[in-house]
């Protein structure tokens, strides 16, 4: 029997980017807020001191900051005819663990989606005809427009100190920035990062081919910056230890660096760490949440009553919590009815690896979101009329470091070990070079999430089952993007070059990205979405899923965090300015 | 020239004192007492971390032994509920508490004696309004014979001059207000004035810096090299209000003073303190020694250690980042005669204070596990003699001593 705690105004499940932003906004509003976090407390000063933060074996290989499968895992399969099996070692994607969530271990690549991404289906129907969209492709318009979200993108970027160069200020194109981006109301808070040699070479080659390269918008920031919460960030040192690592220099935007110092000072906020929320509790009508139940590390069960429940875990675990709590109708791919688990999508990445002639690239001087990119082949920035696919992505020199255990390029045909391998590794380390594409992943009727019929977690609850594969559309898209990237690579005159477009089937044992999206998608129609345009549950109006990537109706050709942050602020405003004045359904 | 009694009134903020005197528990008087308890940083010692406000319990490690700040809530048995108003005044002005019992000067009565009686009675009025908290504190944990309180008669005779603050009519009202706060309630000299062997103030050297509890409280005279001479009034005010300015960040015992006291002072009082400290009449321009040559062995080793361990944050140029990583180049603390704080910070690390104005609270990591005494000494010698800095080399023995004492009381 759960022990009942005193009531709070707001209980937040998970203290990552969305949880910390919502906590700060609502606690500043005077509400009594508690966050329940499954993983440990993590803090820059004590957990990531620069003296040992750059430990590749501990963090990069043994994955110290990530979720352990024994805490929670999921079963995976490529299609509905297969039997899903549990992931016993996370490798294809890596869910974070602990305070800060994915905001701790990310690379810092901070993009906005294109204006036409937000009305994807109607845009494509209008430009190419409804019959051109594959029948099983379940893409849909977002219930918000780019124009509505713009101020919230801006707020998140200012919170995180993002470094970059605007390409479109209030509709006026700006030299040096991304000419394809949506309008921005202000310049990036900090100037672009310095580029390493490889990125400079890429930009030169891309320019020669007629493209317009620009610095990737970055959460690893170029100079010291104090954000609107009064928190100070430091300058990136280009150490090349971002993805999978915490940043000890206060230079990579994260909840710990950007929000927690201000949030933890608020007396009406508290956090309960190492406590896993097992369900959102509903009253007898099933229309109202009464709070959450969680289990601490000693196995003791607690009930935290609250007036508002914010589901702010990692996207996949938001979906599972909604399924386990019975909020919203589970999706059935056979009938196409139901919504929770629908429109799971991923990201379609690919790369070209090269060895350059007589070049000392010093790629270890790097940062997780540095690099020069081009955006000519993203979204609908290019004509898809005769291409046989929709979607696209950005591409560029996204080398994020050259950490010695996992970065050891050798020429083709080199033995896998021994003296020859050592010789080749030493010779090639400084001239090996990888560039990549980062493509969209549209949603399909039979790519979805549900509860596994067989496997259970340590608390006896069913694991979530993921059914996903790359579809023809995405494979053609990746081939097209990779071909364009290879053309730029050729212009660099490499000694050797390997282009690797994404091929099916999806393989959960090869790391690609942790951009898992959908499952509790936002939409204008309760028949095809779990939450409304304010990220509020259609079924239980005091439950919100404030902008985790689980609300994306499909995934676009950019990294998700910028949009996740924008939606967090968007939802916070909806709660503050609408819900609190008149609790109930906002749509 | 300002009329002297008017000046005094401005300094003590006591224009309405006659009205206040009529009602010892008037709202205005209690509120003034509350603010004075902030100026006096009473909570800094009398509130234990995580404990009830003013219920005592913070242990002070003095060179003579341990003293625990008593419970000053109005609880009759364990607090000061039985103390008369006159006894309260005598406590602050004379170091004699309930029933005439002698206090140890860990309670800074040698500074509080400068406070006006009206201010002391206002504080008394405020403390009376607190919720009584039952919390038995054994204050006197000194070893024999120091635990005999009567010894303080002798100590006071040597070290204690009772008497109220005397304004200087040659100076502005702001200067006098600042001087009153610094010398009286804020008791800055309790840490920043060096102590005699008996723990009394070296009165000839006020505010030139003192060593206590494993930290060196820096020189806050107007000396441009060792003190705050290079800081503007605005720099000082920003530091006191937020704990951070373009030179440095507060940590160690000063972060307690900033948390409980200076960050909560009103802007006029902070400006007054800055006015006084920038014109305190103490501190000259100490001669700059010749920096140790870069070719010196310790300097060469220190440069390499600095590059590997320090430069990522403090930069090759020693400039750091404002609000995050203190500037080492030109830092008075880095060049101070006493390297206690430097060794402390490198060995144990430290964390900056978090305030409303500067919530970040960045940290310096501990290096005791990866640098030995000679290496710490070398890197300190290097930072004390680079980028225009100049100061004596730090001997490895000083680091060893600090390491040993930190092991005993981290």
Image (cartoon, helix red, strand yellow):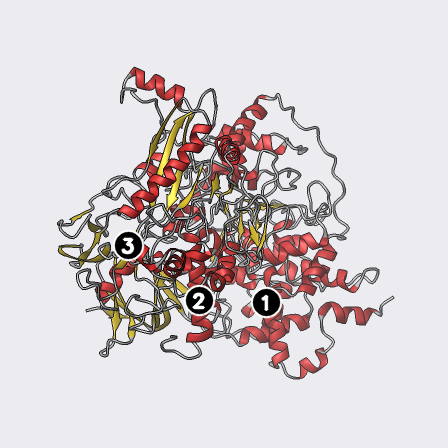
Q: Position of residue A508 (x, y in %)?
A: 24, 43
Q: Residue furthest right?
A: B1
Q: Position of residue A376 (x, y in %)?
A: 46, 44
Residue marked by disc 2? A572
Q: Residue at x 59, y 60 (%)?
A: B263
Q: Dot 1: what SS?
A: helix
Q: Chain of mark 2?
A: A
Instruction: Judge by depth and name the residue closer to the eye, B387 or B256.
Output: B387
Residue A94 visible in the displayed image: no
The CA span between labels 3 and 2 is: 36 Å
Q: Dot 2: what SS?
A: helix
The CA span between labels 2 and 1 is: 39 Å
Q: In the rendered structure, are the residues bearing label 2 and label 1 in contact, judged by CB atoms less than 8 Å apart? A: no
Residue A561 visible in the displayed image: yes
Q: Chain of mark 1?
A: B
Q: Dot 3: what SS?
A: loop
The CA span between labels 3 and 1 is: 73 Å
Q: Residues within 10 Å of mark 1 (few under 14, many from 20)?
A: many
Residue marked by disc 1? B37
Q: In the rendered structure, are the residues bearing label 3 and label 2 in contact, judged by CB atoms less than 8 Å apart? A: no
Q: Position of residue B149 (x, y in %)?
A: 54, 58
Instruction: Judge by depth and name the residue closer to the eye, A91 or A180.
Output: A180
Residue marked by disc 3? A134
Q: Chain of mark 3?
A: A
């Amino acid at each position: 029997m759960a022990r009942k705690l005193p009531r709070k105004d707001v209980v937040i499940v998970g203290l990552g980017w969305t949880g910390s932003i919502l906590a700060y906004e609502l606690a500043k509003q005077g509400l009594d807020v508690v966050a329940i976090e499954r993983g440990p407390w993590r803090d820059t000063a004590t957990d990531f001191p620069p003296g040992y933060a750059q430990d590749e074996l501990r963090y990069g290989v043994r994955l110290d900051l990530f979720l352990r499968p024994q805490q929670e895992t999921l079963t995976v399969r490529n299609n509905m005819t297969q039997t899903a099996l549990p992931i016993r070692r996370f490798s294809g994607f890596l869910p974070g663990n602990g305070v800060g969530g994915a905001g701790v271990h990310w690379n810092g690549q901070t993009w906005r989606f294109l204006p036409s991404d937000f009305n994807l289906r109607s845009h494509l129907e209008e430009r190419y005809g409804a019959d051109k969209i594959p029948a099983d492709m379940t893409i849909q318009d977002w219930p918000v427009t780019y124009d509505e979200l713009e101020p919230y993108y801006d707020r998140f970027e200012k919170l995180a100190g993002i470094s970059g160069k605007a390409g479109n200020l209030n509709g006026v194109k700006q030299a040096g920035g991304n000419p394809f981006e949506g309008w921005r109301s202000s310049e990036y808070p900090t100037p672009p990062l310095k580029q390493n040699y490889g990125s400079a070479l890429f930009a030169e080659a891309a320019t020669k081919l007629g493209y317009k390269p620009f610095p990737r918008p970055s959460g690893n920031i170029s100079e010291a910056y104090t954000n609107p919460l009064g928190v100070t960030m430091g300058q990136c040192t280009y150490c090349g230890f971002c993805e999978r690592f915490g940043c000890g220099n206060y230079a990579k935007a994260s909840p710990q660096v950007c929000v927690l110092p201000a949030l933890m000072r608020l007396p009406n906020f508290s956090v309960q760490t190492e406590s896993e929320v097992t369900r959102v509790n509903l009253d007898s009508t099933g229309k109202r949440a009464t709070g959450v139940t969680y289990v601490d590390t000693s196995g003791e069960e607690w009930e935290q009553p609250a007036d508002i429940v914010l589901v702010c875990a990692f996207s996949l675990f938001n979906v599972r919590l909604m399924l386990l709590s019975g909020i919203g109708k589970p999706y059935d791919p056979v009938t196409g009815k139901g919504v929770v688990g629908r429109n799971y999508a991923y990201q379609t990445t690919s790369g070209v690896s090269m060895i350059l002639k007589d070049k000392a690239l010093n790629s270890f001087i790097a940062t997780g979101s540095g690099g020069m990119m081009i955006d000519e082949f993203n979204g609908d920035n290019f004509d898809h009329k005769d291409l046989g696919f929709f979607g696209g992505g950005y591409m560029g020199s996204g080398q994020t470091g050259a950490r010695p255990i996992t970065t050891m390029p050798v020429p083709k045909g080199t033995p896998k070990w021994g003296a020859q391998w050592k010789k080749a590794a030493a010779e090639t380390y400084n001239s090996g070079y990888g560039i990549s594409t980062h493509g969209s992943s549209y949603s399909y009727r039979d790519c979805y999430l549900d509860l596994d019929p067989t496997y259970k977690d340590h608390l006896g609850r069913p694991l979530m089952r993921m059914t996903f594969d790359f579809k023809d559309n995405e494979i053609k898209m990746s081939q097209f993007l990779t071909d364009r990237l290879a053309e730029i690579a050729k212009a660099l005159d490499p000694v050797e070059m390997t282009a690797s477009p994404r091929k099916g089937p999806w393989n959960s044992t090869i790391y690609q990205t942790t951009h898992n999206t959908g499952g509790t998608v936002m939409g204008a129609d309760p028949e095809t979405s779990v939450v409304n345009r304010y990220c509020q549950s259609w079924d239980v109006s005091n439950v919100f899923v404030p902008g985790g990537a689980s609300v994306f109706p499909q995934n676009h050709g950019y990294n998700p965090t910028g949009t996740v942050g924008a939606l967090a602020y968007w939802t916070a405003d909806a709660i503050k300015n609408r819900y609190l004045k008149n609790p109930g359904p906002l749509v | 020239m300002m009329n002297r009694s008017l000046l005094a009134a401005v300094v003590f903020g006591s224009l309405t004192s006659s009205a206040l005197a009529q009602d010892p528990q008037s709202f205005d008087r209690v509120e003034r007492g509350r603010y004075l308890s902030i100026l006096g940083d009473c909570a800094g010692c009398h509130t234990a971390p995580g404990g009830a406000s003013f219920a005592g319990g913070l242990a002070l490690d003095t060179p003579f032994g341990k003293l625990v700040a008593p419970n000053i809530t109005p609880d009759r048995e364990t607090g000061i509920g039985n103390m008369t108003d006159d006894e309260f005044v005598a406590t602050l002005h004379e170091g004699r508490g309930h029933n005439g019992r002698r206090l140890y000067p860990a309670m800074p009565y040698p500074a509080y004696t400068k406070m006006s009686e009206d201010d002391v009675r206002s504080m008394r009025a405020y403390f009376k309004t607190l919720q009584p908290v039952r919390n038995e504190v054994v204050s006197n944990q000194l070893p024999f014979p120091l635990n005999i309180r009567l010894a303080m008669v002798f100590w006071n005779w040597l070290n204690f001059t009772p008497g109220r603050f005397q304004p200087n009519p040659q100076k502005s009202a702001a200067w006098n207000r600042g001087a009153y706060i610094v010398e009286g309630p804020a008791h800055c000299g309790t840490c920043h004035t060096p102590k005699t062997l008996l723990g009394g103030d070296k009165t000839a050297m006020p505010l030139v810096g003192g060593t206590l509890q494993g930290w060196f409280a820096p020189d806050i005279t107007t000396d441009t090299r060792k003190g705050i001479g290079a800081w503007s009034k605005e720099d000082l005010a920003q530091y006191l209000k937020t704990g951070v300015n373009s030179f440095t960040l507060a940590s160690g015992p000063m972060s307690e003073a900033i948390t409980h006291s200076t960050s909560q002072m009103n802007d006029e009082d902070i400006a007054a303190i800055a006015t006084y400290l920038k014109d305190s009449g103490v501190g000259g321009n100490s001669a700059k020694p010749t920096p140790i040559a870069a070719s010196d062995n310790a300097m060469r080793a220190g440069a390499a250690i600095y590059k590997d361990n320090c430069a990522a944050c403090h930069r090759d140029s020693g400039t750091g980042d404002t609000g995050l990583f203190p500037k080492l180049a030109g830092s008075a603390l880095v060049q101070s005669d006493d390297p206690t704080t430097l060794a402390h910070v490198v060995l144990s690390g430290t964390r900056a204070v978090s305030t409303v104005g500067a919530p970040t609270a960045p940290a310096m990591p501990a290096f005791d596990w990866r640098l030995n005494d000679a290496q710490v000494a070398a890197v300190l010698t290097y930072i004390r003699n680079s980028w225009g800095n100049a100061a004596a080399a730090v001997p490895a023995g000083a680091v060893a001593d600090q390491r040993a004492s930190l092991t005993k009381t981290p």
